[in-house]
Amino acid sequence: MYWGGKGHGAFKTNPSLECNTKEKIQVSDPQSTLRVFASKSHFNAETEAFIESLGSEVQLVQAGSSLKFLRIAEGLADLYPRLAPTCEWDTAAAQAVLEGAGGTVSQPDNSPVVYGKAEILNPHFIAKGKV
């Protein structure tokens, strides 16, 4: 289980330890190879172009939705561009954990991703650690 929020830190329970043991998680410093997560089912030309524009050596990992945020929060990945549709319920909790771990989530123009809108679809966004 993961939990956290901006200004509150981020944590997870470690299943190999006692149930009540919490482990603090945080984003990592960038590596020489940028670890980029992308969607398995929504990898499109726009996402591919974004990754190519990074100008860095990239290790591409594909995984399911909120897991990508959590891997960045744990310091196991650096960047997750989502340039295809998601809904608020796909991202809200994981965004809170990532921000608690020191990461950020913003639209490609650096404006914030906001919740509780009349339209439940999210704008395109970039979730990232210390990059």
Image: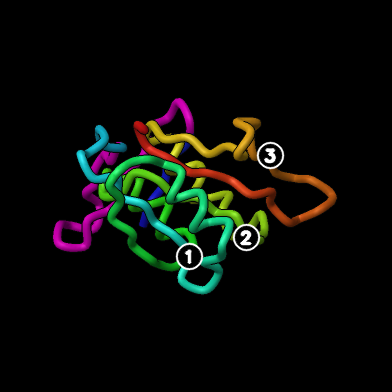
Q: Is residue 98 left or right of residue 57?
A: right
Amino acid type of the residue that numbered disc 3 sits on in the rendered structure? Val
Q: Amino acid at mark 1?
A: Ser
- Disc 1 to disc 2: CB gap under 8 Å: yes
Residue beneath label 1, please? Answer: 39
Label of residue 84 in the image: 2
Residue 8 at what x, y percent from top left? 42, 30
CB of mark 3 within 8 Å of CB of mark 2? no
State the extent of the magenta-drawn residues as a range: 6-26
Tag count: 3
Q: Is residue 108 left or right of residue 49?
A: right
- Give the mark nearest the N terminus, 3 or 2: 2
Q: State how far apart marks 3 and 1 are (Cα).
A: 21 Å
The quarter of the displayed image where residue 98 is located: top left
Q: Mark 3 packing: few (<14 Cα in 10 Å), some, or many (20+)?
A: few
Q: Main secondary structure of the magenta part?
A: loop
Q: In the image, which disc is placed on residue 114?
A: 3
Q: Residue at x 28, y 55 (%)?
A: 59
- Residue at 58 percent of width and 49 percent of height: 92
Residue 8's place in the image compared with 24, above or below, is: above
Note whether 87 is above or below 74 in the view shown. below
x, y percentage for residue 45? 56, 62
> Does residue 67 show up magenta in the picture?
no
Mark 3 and mark 2: span between their CA atoms? 17 Å
Q: Position of residue 78 (x, y in %)?
A: 34, 44
Counting residues from the start of the chain, the first of labels 1 and 2 encountered is 1
Q: Residue reaching furthest bottom?
A: 41
Please name whichever residue, 27 or 36, is drawn nearer the observer in this view of the structure.
Answer: 36
Disc 2 on helix, strand or loop? loop
> Looking at this rendering, what residue extends furthest in the left direction?
17
**Separation of marks 1 and 2 at Cα, in angstroms:** 9 Å
